[in-house]
Amino acid sequence: METLTPTRPPALAEARRLVVKIGSALLVDRETGALRSDWLASMVADVARIKARGTDVILVSSGSIALGRGVLGLGQGALSLDEAQAAAAVGQIRLARAYEEALAPHGITAAQILLTLDDSGDRRRYLNTRATMAALLARGAVPIVNENDTIATDEIRYGDNDRLAAQVAAMAAADVCVLLSDVDGLYTANPRLDPSARHLPVIEAITPEIEAMAGDAGSGLSKGGMKTKVMAARTATAAGCAMAIAKGETMHPLTALEQGARTTWFTATLDPQAARKRWISAMKPRGTLRLDAGAVAALGRGKSLLPAGVTAVTGAFKRGDPVMLEGPDGGALGLGLSRYDAAETRAIAGHRSDEIGAILGYPGRAALVHRDDMAL
Ligand code: GLU
């Protein structure tokens, strides 16, 4: 395998889990509305090469509206919300098929995940989506994520997928997120209007100055606006994920990035696990689980909390809510997100995980609090 020289920090070559956002303009020819299949094939070849070295890859792809509008004869003008949603319904099938067909020659399975931007806000859906994503990645599949435009209740804003990509990166605990778009990064001013504008290769902190450089939505360089990209960077970096804004038009855009193409990197100070623990530890607990000594010892070895180790349950919490974990003597151990609500937890506490199905009447997850969802 060829060796790639890491360029600017952080190196894409060292990513453990990578999210790549692909904008509509890269995938779909503006004039003809046709899929740019050569470009897609080259980008997917990069993905296959990156996956082959052990990196998980998640793609967040736009393009459903751009692909569907022509099919419905909607022309090139502005679309009403219902027209855009109808176009998305038609285009999303084509988009998913395009990825499936492009990945298949590499022996990679494509999986479609349609989210709404607030899925990450609802902790129960968040945990399910996270688990689904993990199950797909563990089996080598590439999740292809888009907003569920057909049922979205807000206007579909071009550029929202920048923010969606950052949310997906946070949800999946990705360490690198790349926004492939029509700009090669952030400048001190709009370079098309101001010849003294300087390109910023690395941004370590999103200061008010940086936000001012990004301008307002729509007035930036890319259609989505630099502002949504900087908002995305804030979300990604807070979750321990470095983010790049890179130009995607060239063939093999990810290889180009690895080989030093101009880009802006937003660096993260924490790694995704540490950022996640900090996020959890800042939550207000909705209940308490008292653990026995065996469970406390298992947690100390980095294991998940099983219902068998729980001796008492207090509070009224829902699935995904934070609960306080305490030792046999009531000493606080930390916080965790419960995979069961309070009533379910009371029913299965003290029981073996293989009894959960019989007790609840439906199959459940073995762990009550997964080790990734704990801050001890
Ligand atoms: N979700 C929209 C689509 O697939 C695009 C949103 C965006 O580009 O940010 O057409």
Image (tube, helix red, strand yellow):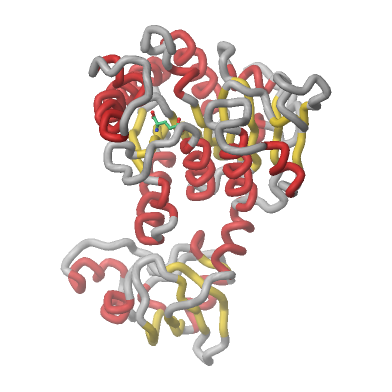
> Is residue 235 left or right of 263 when viewed as pictured?
left
* 283 relative to 209 in the view: left or right: left
Q: Residue furthest bottom?
A: 329
Q: Quadrant of residue 9?
A: top right
Q: Tell me which residue sits at (36%, 47%) in the image.
A: 132
Image vertical order of residue 323 relative to residue 249, above or below: below
Which quarter of the figure is the C terminus placed in? bottom right
- Please provide percent x and percent y for residue 64: 35, 26
User: At 38% across and 84% down in the image, what residue appears?
Assistant: 315
Rendered position, 246 above or below 145: above
Identified at 43% across, 39% down, the residue is 137
Give the residue at x 20% y 71%: 360
Question: Where 19 sits versus 335, above or below?
Answer: above
Q: Quadrant of residue 348?
A: bottom left
| Residue 293, percent from left and from top | 50, 83
Q: Is residue 279 left or right of residue 341?
A: right
Give the camera-side residue of 77 and 27: 77
Residue 277 vs residue 263, the one in the foreground: 263
Quadrant of the frame with the N terminus: top right
Ligand 1 shows up in the quarter that is top left
In the rendering, at what x and y percent does residue 366 appear?
Answer: 34, 63
Expressed as whole percent of the image width and height from the top left, the position of residue 212 reads: 71, 42
